[in-house]
Amino acid sequence: MNTIARDPKGYYAILGLAPGADAGAIKSAYRSRVKTVHPDRNASKRAQEEFQRVIEAYGVLKDVVRRAEYDTFGQEASHDDDAQVAGAPIACGGCGALTAQPRYVIYHWVRSYLVWAKNGTVEGIFCRACADRASVRASIITWAWGWWSLPGLLLAPLALLRNLLGGTKPRHENARVLIRQARAFLGRGELELARSLAQQAGRFARLPDDRARVEDLMHATRDVPDNRRLKARWRLRGGVFLAQALPLMALPVTVGVFALIATKPWDLPVATSAAPIAMQPAKSGEIRHVAVDSLKVRMAPLPGAPVLTLLDRFTTVEVGADPVDPEWVKIRTPSGIDGFVETRSLYAGSGGRFKAQWCAENRGAQPSAGEILTRRVSGDHRLLVHNEGRRDGVIKLKTLAGNTVTAFYVPATYHIGIGGIPEGTYRIEFATGARYSRGCGVFLDDMQASVLPVTLTFKYQSAGTIRSLTKIAEISLAPAPDDPVQPQPLPADRFAADD
């Protein structure tokens, strides 16, 4: 609470605070100070006196009304709630001006620190103008620093909403403040103000004692007509309310936009069920992907037209022109071939995300160590593979034309010998990662594909030739840094091209 900077009885000083300290600082200082001066811990002759002074100071400063009186007048004008008439009216704790409609209001702020958040308050007995400034100050702190942690994402909107709705106005404290203010104006003979304040206090009064005091004030001002009352200044309206409401109203819109960007509903397949496929007319320049295996791209929009090329499932294509026949659409393939396909064979959006989902759903069982994933030709040669890395690997021996002859699985830290390799010259391609998908021939997590810049040649050996284990070909998926044969990066699509 902001106050007049005086401390005649030394209440703030005894707690080690400056006049105007907030409630949280007062409570913290009291706990620390009372431990220091408590007679059981302090052997000083003045310990008992200092301890009583700390208790007295805290008793005044923790109480809303008594502290307001002390801050305004430099003394406690009245600390007895049963007193019939109090002294001069309490001033606003923000600007120090006399206010006919004071409120004790608590505004909330949140500061985030990456992994945790701190919440606090700006509170005091304010006039409406100072309350608006305190509300805006607390909300600005929250908007600027409240969002940068997971707890902050939950606490910041709650704090902003509380401030928008006028802050927290504790009933008992506000009833006491308004009763105190009504008594002060009653003592000055300003009966209309006293009656209006008593009526406002009645809206907050819930305890029997508070209601009885309100009734006494209403009886003392019974000659004042009820139509002579103060204009309400605490309604939720005006520029300050709009300044806080508009950005808070825009928050759900912003969250919705980010949710749309994350989910990309426009990328969902056109089909809605297993019944006849619901088709949307294709538009020129629209991006779609192939939804069937081995889609035939034809020279004309006819079932018997010559086939130009075949497209794999999930291949992304571009619609070339607005179709005349809704059953057929003209497309351009990634290789630049223009042709016609049936509209029902294409789904909306690019195929990358849908392929990843399909690969995860068709992952299959985890391969075992040394399992042969593909074998198109068999032979008598052997190969020793070292996988000293921390990720599982799949090794492919491919012909120089790019066709896979055999593929096998080598888990992390394994050394495995593979047999049944036919004679020939092969390129060695391999991929490492986690969660291998048999359906797509790729790793679903952290996949990295590579190719060795050398080839392996296996030649025919006669039955009489002595074969020594020391002559078995060897490759390493994680060669030493000084090894001249280092793997070269390879696109993942190229690694799985012939699967």
Image (tube, rainbow, N blue to C red):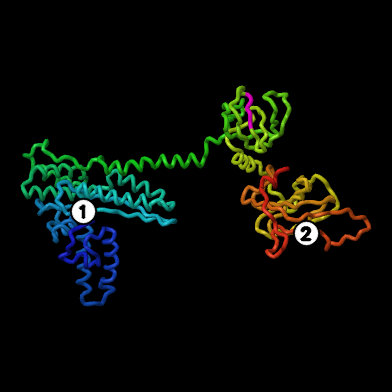
* Residue positioned 58% across, 36% down in the render: 349
Q: Which mark is residue 457?
A: none
Q: What SS does tag 2 mark?
A: strand
In the image: residue 278, left or right of residue 50: right
Residue 125 to residue 308: above or below? below
In the displayed image of the protein, which residue is found farthest to the top? 325
Q: Mark 1 = which residue?
A: 94
- Residue labelled with disc 2: 474
Three-letter code, disc 2: Glu
- Relative image position of residue 388 (x, y in whole percent): 69, 60
Quarter occupied by the N terminus: bottom left
Give the residue type that dot 1 points to: Gly
Dominant secondary structure (helix, strand or loop) of the stretch shown in magenta: strand
* Label 2 environment density (alpha carbons within 10 Å; few <14, some 14–19, many ≥20): few
Indicate whether 277 appears above or below 142. above
The range drawn in magenta is 327-331
x, y percent for residue 67: 19, 58
> Measured from the top left, where is residue 289 in percent x and y?
62, 35
